[in-house]
Image (cartoon, rainbow, N blue to C red):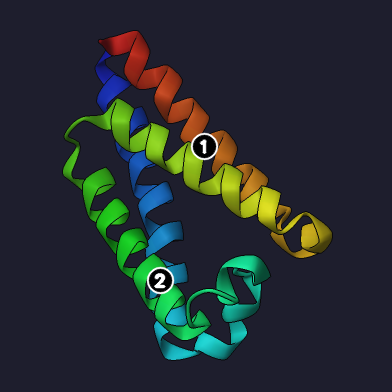
Amino acid sequence: MAQYEHLVSFFLRSGLAVGFLYAALSSFLDPNAWVGFLPIEVRAVISGQALLALFSLYEIALSLWLLSGRAVRNAARASIATMTLIIIFNLPSLDIVFRDLVILAAAAALLAHSSKRA
């Protein structure tokens, strides 16, 4: 089984990257469908469109980081933090963001896997 260890990391990293990349690109194409997921308290301080664009750029950067395979534990930690905050700020919409729990679990699995290899 040890010969497949690198594949586990690759599939976890790729799956997470695709999730973040899809959300980022989709929010650029249809920002009105995504801006409602941003915390209203933050949108009171900064334009929702501007914040959404910044967050999308962050998600693209995180996707590229995950795909690079560098500092995987830190990328996994950033993924966990991102998904945790998304879930917390959108608890009233849990029927929509429940899938984010799966992404959070994949990020946790990547952290556990990369910690095991370190």
Above/below status of 69 relative to 30? above
Which element carries disc 2, helix, strand or loop? helix
| Residue 99 visible (yes or no) | yes
Viewer-proximal residue among 43 and 96: 43
Residue 96 pos. (x, y %): 75, 65
Position of 17 with respect to 68 (left or right) is right
Which element carries disc 1, helix, strand or loop? helix
Q: Are marks 1 and 2 in contact (CB under 8 Å)?
A: no
Write the residue at 30% across / 68% down. 57
Task: Tell me the quarter of the picture where residue 43 sits.
Answer: bottom right
Write the residue at 68% across / 55% down. 89
Above/below status of 9 relative to 5? below
Query: Which residue, given by chain and number where applicable, does mark 2 sit on?
Result: 24
Write the residue at 59% across / 69% down. 38
Q: Amino acid at mark 1?
A: Ala
Query: Which residue, given by chain and number where applicable, does mark 1 sit on?
Result: 106
Position of 50 with respect to 82 (left or right) is left
Above/below status of 24 relative to 32? above
Viewer-proximal residue among 30 and 55: 55
